[in-house]
Amino acid sequence: MSLVYLPERVWSTRYGVDYFTVKVDGYHVRDNKYAVYEMNVHNGKQQWKVFRRFSEFDRFRSNRWRQPTSACAGGRPSVLAPAKTYCCRDLNPDFLDRRRAQLHDFLQDLLVIPKVATDKAVKEFLQLHNSKCLFV
């Protein structure tokens, strides 16, 4: 069976290693210079944290999901990612929490698209390849 994404509201470990969910749970400011967003990924009974900067989310989306050759997304930008800030880095907690929620919604909207969860870029971004259960 292929790897299948389930929204967190229906997630349970009883689904086993063929299923996963992800939640953007928080953020951490590093060296008062930038923020990383904390994703909690669950796959079967395993769980792990993945930390990504906004620029990594942006690169992930623009490199993969906007390309005409992207079969998973039908070759069109099908989900909206949060907007960039161009003038400065905003480390205000209210801004970071809003962006965290937007990144969470972006991932949820992306992962419900058929076949996206099995895409190599998604597995790498969420570090699903680290799950030992996937390669038994």
Image (cartoon, grey):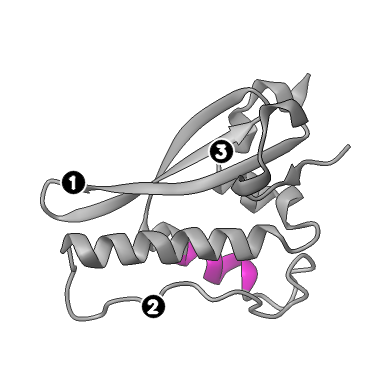
Between discs 1 and 2, the one toward the N terminus: 1
Element class at badge 2:
loop
> Residue 133, percent across and down?
71, 22
- Residue span colored magenta: 58-65
Looking at the rendered image, the quarter that the N terminus falls into is: top right
Instruction: Give whichever of discs 3 and 1 has the lower sequence position.
Output: 1
Q: Residues within 10 Å of mark 2 (few under 14, many from 20)?
A: few
Q: Residue 17: in sight, yes or no?
A: no
Measuring from the top left, give residue 23's x and y in whole percent. Answer: 50, 47
Check residue 60 for magenta coloring.
Answer: yes
Residue at the spot of label 3: 127
Q: Which mark is residue 53?
A: none
| Mark 3 vs 1: CB contact within 8 A | no
Q: Which mark is residue 30?
A: 1
Q: Amino acid at mark 2?
A: Ala
Using the rendered image of the protein, determine whether residue 88 is visible from the camera's viewpoint: yes
Q: Label 1 sits on what residue type? A: Arg
Query: In the rendered structure, which disc, 2 or 3, sits on the residue that comes first in sequence?
Result: 2
- Looking at the image, is 92 positioned above or below residue 50? below
In the rendered image, the vertical position of residue 37 relative to residue 65, given as above or below: above
Residue at the right extreme, as displayed:
1
Residue 16 lies left or right of residue 37; in this view the side is right
